[in-house]
Image (cartoon, helix red, strand yellow):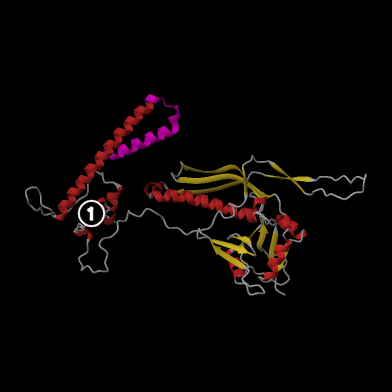
Amino acid sequence: MNRRKEIEQRLAAIKAELETRGAEMNADEIKALEEEVTALQEERAAIDAAAEQRNNLLTRLAEGKADNNGNAPTVLRSFGAMDGSQNAEQRAAAEDKYSTMQYRKAFMDYVTRGVEMPVEYRTDAVTKTTDVGAVIPTVVLNQIIEKLETAGNILALVTRTAYKGGVSIPKSTAKPTASWVAEGAGSTKQKKTAGSVTFAYHKLRCAVAVSLEVDTMSIAAFESLLIANIVEAMTKALDAAIINGTGSGQPTGILVAANVSAAATAGQVVETSALKYADLTTAEGDLPEAYEGGAVWCMSKKTFMGFIGMVDDNKQPIARINYGLNGKPERVLLGRPVVCTEHMPSFAAISVAAGSTDSPYFAFLFNFKDYVLNTNYQLGVKKYEDNDTDDQITKGVMLVDGKAVDINSLVVLKKIASA
């Protein structure tokens, strides 16, 4: 085993010792470890510098450069270091010469000072005006391109709380009414009825595992991407649960059967076989006046784009898209904001058989402030190691529950089979 590997193992051992019993160490022990780490890092840097110096010398010999006496040596074959001191970058050079430190330095000189690239990095061909001057080093770009997804546009609208699980929010189901009475007469005493909404514990978890080799060799962007993916996945799961959650092992969604049934009883379900202007006006009419202040439309983007081309009797578009100063489209239907989400099916994608009464809903009106998302344990991201496989696992965990505490603003649009 070479000295550099011994240094790496000792540094790893010191790190493990600090993680396991660092809180129990006194100041002298910590100082001694600090001095040892400094000495080991300096020794490692000296070893790396010597290795780079050796490889630079080998490169010069391979290029046939003259020695101090002006003699140009004849190089028959060039060998790497035999003591195993090559680092990961040097080992990768055999596969990708454009990732070596030598090329990166030559590339910098080419860009900043116009120094010609060494012959080993140029091809034996005529350079044309359409050709680039040098190949961009492989290690310059430190990012990962990934398909984008929407997440969080529903979560940002609801009411957030952080109470312990089991908390109940009282809610009244009726209000007293006043009546006109004659002089000296009294009114009928009225009962104030009240119920409650109770929040439970539901655990939301997302874990991603990579092998020890991948974790050690990956670029810096990889680890940050894993954390971003976990947060995005959990946010997307919350968005879906707020709308369609069953309430069993997850939050109760706005469109749960009990809420839609209550909306139907109140006459706030609009059935339609086609996207029509009259259905929008009917839905607006069904929305109680007391709740129209904060209610917004919620539907898929495809459904909204189906409305945008519709015109009223005066041939005026019923939908508007205003582009604000921030360059973001502000979608509006009949003056009311529209929230687009992928968790609602598009109208065109819903297939309803003749005579069927069971079909998903494609849009609804609701004041999202009337939905309470209670987080008992805020999202925490943790990284740990599986001792059996040495896999590095990154996980996110949170305890959450959610319910619509007031559904009087809910107006649902449902697709039915055409007559």
Point 79% across, 48% down: residue: 175
103 relative to 359 in the view: left or right: left
The kind of residue tagged 1 is Asp
What percent of the width, then of the height, locates residue 250?
Answer: 63, 50
Give the camera-side residue of 323 and 356: 323
Question: Which residue is label 1 attached to?
Answer: 109
Please provide the residue range marked out in magenta: 1-28
Which quadrant is home to the C terminus? bottom right
Residue at the outermost front position:
183
Can residue 1 be spotted in the picture?
no
Q: Of 342 and 153, which appears nearest the observer?
A: 153
- Give the main secondary structure of the magenta stretch: helix
Q: Is residue 187 left or right of residue 5?
A: right
In the figure, 406 relative to 128: above or below?
Answer: above
Q: Quadrant of residue 16?
A: top left
Per the image, is 9 magenta? yes
The image quarter containing residue 282 is bottom right
